[in-house]
Amino acid sequence: MTASALVRMMDKAMNIGSSRILVTGGAGFLGSHLCDRLIAAGHEVLCLDNFYTGSKRNISHLLAHPRFELIRHDVTFPLYIEADAIYNLACPASPIHYQNDPVQTLKTSVHGAINMLGLAKRLRIPIFQASTSEVYGDPSVHPQKEDYWGNVNPLGIRSCYDEGKRAAETLFFDYHRQHGLNIKVARIFNTYGPRMHPNDGRVVSNFIVQALKGEDITIYGDGSQTRSFCYADDLVEGFIRLMATDDDVTGPVNLGNPGEFTILQLAEKVIELTGTGSTLVRKPLPADDPKQRCPDISLARAKLGWEPTIQLEDGLKRTIIYFDDLLKNG
Ligand code: NAD
Ligand code: UDP
């Protein structure tokens, strides 16, 4: 990226304007942080959610804001509104939640993408897609770069999510090629932080909640599988920068923290930071659980001038404070 393109993109990202921005899945973990960020930047936010996994608690502080509007709606149904840009985040993200109603998960990714792309096409506005590192499946290339096609089981219990997100990417690129739509596709790697659902079964929330309650910490398999954990604020910064790029930047762009940890290392870190007396217990490894995952973020560095700034230990401390308060005060 040239210096002038970087300056132009940063100017756009920092721009205090009054665009009306639709955030689907806006009451979820990441969506609510994005809504905060967009409101702080001076935008009008239309937060759309069907509250499948999201919660009013995540956005309660925004409900009375004059530039914030909540729309209860399911993205699998068409939507007719006016907006200047769309961030499409609606989709359950944790394995427990997306496997609870796999057909609805697939519909949310595919029908949701079709409906939001149709809206973007009618309005001729840019649209961002929250895709995922799951499109790489159980990867045979490490770390994962955007040109890797992935190793996904199309028939397994994770497929409703993985294949749904892959089909959504296909739709985004077909709308781009066929209709000239301005698309921005981000492949998000494991992200954590305040407002994660305490019972969503994801590893960071599980370990912290278990540690704070003094319960056993559940290691699936032998704990040697790896993940790379990005703090929510870092990720949202990546979203904003990607949306601010010139029209020819479509992605897919990996957004994640390249620091790679085994699940056992994560558990030990949580034990150390909470000072818990919890002990580790082994549970069976779920089917199709990827063995290692780590983003190559060269493209994000080059195109967005972006990289994570919050180290795992700092992010965990902030997340522990959130869950501690949640468990004590509800
Ligand atoms: P989340 O479950 O907290 O948020 C998803 C939101 O979408 C919830 O508020 C939910 O109620 C809403 N939703 C679900 N189905 C809907 C539907 N049919 N219509 C309208 N709203 C619907 O999850 P999250 O972690 O905030 O993830 C947000 C997005 O980022 C998802 O698309 C997810 O696939 C993607 N992502 C997240 C991660 C991560 O580590 N958090 C990693 C990769 C990709
Ligand atoms: N995991 C674990 N204990 C838990 C929850 C998850 O060992 O209580 C493991 C899980 O098997 C996976 C990793 O942690 O290998 C990350 O799981 P998560 O559900 O957070 O995300 P994903 O598998 O989608 O990356």
Image: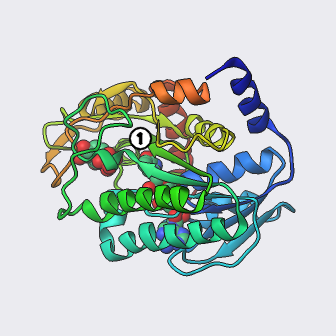
Q: Residues within 10 Å of mark 1 (few under 14, many from 20)?
A: many
For image coordinates 45% across by 51% down, the residue present is 131
Q: In this view, does 179 lie to the left or right of 99?
A: right
For image coordinates 34% across by 55% down, the residue present is 201
Q: Measured along the vertical axis of the image, is residue 80 above or below residue 152?
A: below
Q: In which quarter of the image is the C terminus?
A: bottom right
Q: Nearer the viewer, residue 3 or 17?
A: 3
Residue found farthest to the bottom = 77
Q: Return the x and y of residue 167 as percentages of the image width and height.
A: 37, 62
Q: Residue 149 falls in which quadrant of the image?
A: top left
Q: In this view, does 8 lie to the left or right of 17?
A: left
Q: Return the x and y of residue 97 as percentages of the image width and height.
A: 36, 65
| Residue 215 appears anywhere in the view | no
Q: Measured along the vertical axis of the image, is residue 15 above or below residue 205?
A: above
Q: Is residue 42 left or right of residue 5?
A: right
Q: How many labels does the image show?
A: 1
Query: Which three-letter amino acid code belongs to the residue tagged 1?
Result: Phe
Q: Mark 1 points at which residue?
A: 189
Q: In which quarter of the image is the N terminus?
A: top right
SS under mark 1: loop
Q: Which of 309 and 219 is in front in this view?
A: 309
Q: In this view, does 146 lie to the left or right of 25?
A: left
For image coordinates 68% across by 74% down, the residue present is 71
| Residue 296 appears anywhere in the view | yes
Tell me, what colour scheme is on the image? rainbow
Q: Return the x and y of residue 308 as percentages of the image width and height.
A: 53, 27
Q: Return the x and y of residue 270 as percentages of the image width and height.
A: 37, 32
Residue found farthest to the front = 178
Q: Measured along the vertical axis of the image, is residue 261 above or below residue 210?
A: above
Say if disc 1 is inside 8 Å of ligand 1.
Answer: yes
